[in-house]
Image (tube, rainbow, N blue to C red):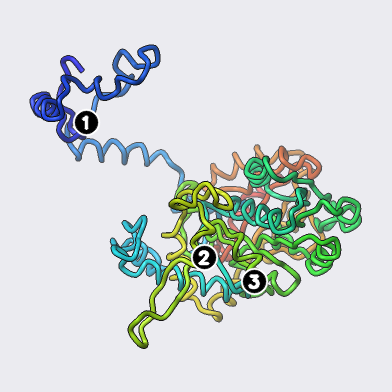
């Protein structure tokens, strides 16, 4: 620290101030604070960092200049989904989640809680009503973690170590689940019908066994189609002594029955469609839901908030349910599994969204998505050499478009589209080579007829 100068962003960095503080605690240099660290791993020189800006204004201008390089959905029409979807976010969602008592309440225990526990209880109640289950957790980091946690719960409940998952799922999500479950569970992929996308029931029957803890499938699927055999899949799982675990897109539940009505024991999903911005890959959050049965409740590793009467008649409080399940406090070494930072703020946001929309709003949302996506499929399918929907199945929000007969690759097409200020669909050719030159397109309530027609015109121009 010889010759160290004051830093504009570090308090107490003036040398005289530092020396006074060091003298107070009885040492001569900052290095003495780290005397236990071996010399061979200490950084001897200065870090290769740019010089600091001398004012907040200069820093802000620099950062805004960098951000301008981003291509956003404000100046481009977006048809890209695949796990992070563009939905309309009501202004009230941002208004509530930016309030200081929620935004800064990381821990939010009773002595410093200004309604966070109640807000999360209300969120849990609203999601429980949406998915027709009794118990919902405080949010996980994202939908992939929620799915991984759900099947780990199934493994502990059944005391088995294999889980069957669909081959037609997001590769990144599969790898997250595989990594998360590597110690306890083996994931086995089940084939799908190449014509319909539906889970191959024959292959499922071949692979299920007395080792199977759960059958996991998604509805709608990652590739957009609606799984038509949900009850049959759940029955096969149950007959083998396994659990049925279903991943769901909550934005579909205004027009589709929830998985609980076709045999799901545990439901997981992403909260991002419920009032949460895309945020350049951030803004992710996941949930899990089960029936109110002890064998399920006691396997949730994350926090659950409940309501209970207080000593004041007619007054109620909100707090943790069966806190000893978790990895917090002195129970950490005995917890079901470790759960770190959670996305409680996004749970509150999802609760605000659901309360704002209500049952009628969720129905209208689902209806608009279905109508607009079906219109897009019809118009794209009319383009010479393009298959607007590769699978012979009903889709919700997302659908697979195949370009094999055009002689062009998805990469070439997407490059052309971006020149037209359009984000094309996710390229599936690497993760799903059996689908050829195909892309996953997404249409939500934010897309207008003019947006879809503009996409169709650009595709026609590209492939002619």
Q: Position of residue 348 (x, y in %)?
A: 43, 65
Labelled disc at residue 428 = none
Residue located beneath label 1 in the image: 53
Left or right of residue 430, residue 450 in this image: left
Q: Is residue 117 left or right of residue 416?
A: left
Cβ atoms at labels 2 and 1 below 8 Å apart: no
The residue under the point 61% across, 59% down is 299
- CA gap between label 2 and label 1 equals 50 Å
Quadrant (top left/top right/bottom left/bottom right) for the C terminus: top right
Q: Is residue 89 left or right of residue 364?
A: left
Q: How far is disc 3 from disc 2 in space, using C-alphas?
A: 13 Å
Q: Earlier in the sequence, mark 2 or mark 1?
A: 1
Question: Percent from the top left, x then y, of residue 92?
Answer: 38, 69
* One can see residue 156 in this view: yes
Check whether the beta carbons of the residues at disc 3 and disc 2 lie within 8 A of each other. Answer: no
Q: Which residue is mark 3?
A: 293
The crowd level at tag 1 (other Cα within 10 Å; few <14, some 14-19, many 20+) is some
The tag earlier along the polypeptide, 3 or 2, is 3
Residue at the spot of label 2: 322
Q: Residues within 10 Å of mark 3 (few under 14, many from 20)?
A: few
The local secondary structure at tag 2 comes to: loop
Q: Choose mark 1 or mark 3, whichever is in front.
A: 3
From the viewer's perspective, is residue 17 above or below residue 45?
below
Frontmost residue, 168 versus 381: 168
Element carrying mark 1: loop
Q: Is residue 452 visible?
A: no
Gap between marks 1 and 3, in whole Å?
57 Å
Q: Secondary structure at mark 3?
A: loop
Q: Of residues 204 and 329, which is closer to you in this image?
A: 329
The x, y position of residue 289, in whole percent, is 61, 66
Give yes or no for contact between labels 1 and 3 (Cβ–Cβ under 8 Å). no
Q: Where in the figure is residue 300, as x and y percent of width and height?
A: 58, 60
């Amino acid at each position: 620290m010889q010759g160290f100068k004051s830093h504009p962003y570090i308090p107490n960095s003036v040398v005289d101030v530092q020396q006074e503080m060091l003298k107070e605690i009885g040492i001569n240099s900052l290095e003495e604070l780290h005397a236990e660290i071996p010399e061979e791993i200490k950084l001897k020189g200065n870090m290769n960092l740019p010089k600091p800006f001398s004012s907040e204004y200069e820093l802000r201008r620099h950062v805004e200049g960098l951000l301008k390089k981003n291509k956003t959905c404000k100046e481009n029409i977006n048809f890209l989904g695949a796990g992070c979807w563009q939905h309309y976010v009501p202004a009230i969602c941002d208004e509530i989640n930016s309030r200081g008592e929620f935004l800064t309440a990381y821990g939010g225990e009773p002595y410093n809680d200004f309604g966070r526990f109640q807000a999360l209880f209300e969120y849990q109640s609203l999601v429980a009503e949406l998915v027709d289950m009794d118990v919902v957790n405080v949010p996980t980091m994202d939908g992939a973690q929620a799915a991984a946690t759900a099947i780990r719960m199934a493994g502990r409940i059944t005391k088995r170590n294999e889980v069957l998952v669909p081959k037609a799922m997001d590769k990144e999500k599969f790898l997250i689940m595989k990594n998360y479950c590597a110690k306890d569970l083996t994931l086995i992929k089940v084939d799908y019908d190449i014509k319909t996308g539906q889970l191959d029931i024959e292959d499922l029957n071949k692979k299920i066994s007395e080792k199977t803890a759960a059958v996991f499938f998604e509805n709608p699927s990652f590739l957009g189609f609606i799984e038509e055999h949900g009850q049959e899949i759940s029955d096969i799982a149950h007959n083998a002594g396994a659990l049925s675990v279903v991943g769901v897109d909550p934005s579909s539940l205004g027009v589709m029955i929830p998985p609980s009505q076709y045999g799901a024991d545990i439901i997981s999903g992403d909260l991002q469609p419920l009032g949460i911005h895309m945020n350049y890959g951030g803004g992710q959050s996941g949930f899990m839901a089960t029936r109110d049965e002890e064998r399920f409740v006691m396997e949730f590793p994350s926090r659950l908030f409940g309501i209970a009467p207080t000593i004041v008649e007619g007054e109620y409080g909100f707090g943790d349910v069966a806190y000893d399940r978790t990895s917090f406090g002195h129970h950490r070494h005995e917890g079901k599994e470790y759960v770190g930072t959670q996305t409680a703020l996004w749970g509150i946001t999802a609760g605000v969204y659901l309360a704002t929309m209500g049952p009628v709003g969720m129905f209208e949302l689902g209806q608009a998505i279905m109508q607009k996506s079906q219109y897009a499929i019809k118009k794209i399918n009319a383009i010479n050499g393009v298959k607007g929907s590769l699978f012979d199945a009903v889709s919700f929000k997302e659908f697979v478009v195949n370009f094999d007969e055009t002689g062009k690759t998805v990469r070439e097409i997407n490059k052309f589209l971006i020149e037209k200020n359009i984000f094309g669909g996710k390229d599936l050719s690497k993760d799903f080579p059996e689908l050829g030159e195909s892309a996953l397109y997404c249409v939500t309530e934010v897309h207008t007829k003019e947006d879809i027609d503009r996409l169709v015109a650009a595709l026609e121009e590209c492939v002619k």
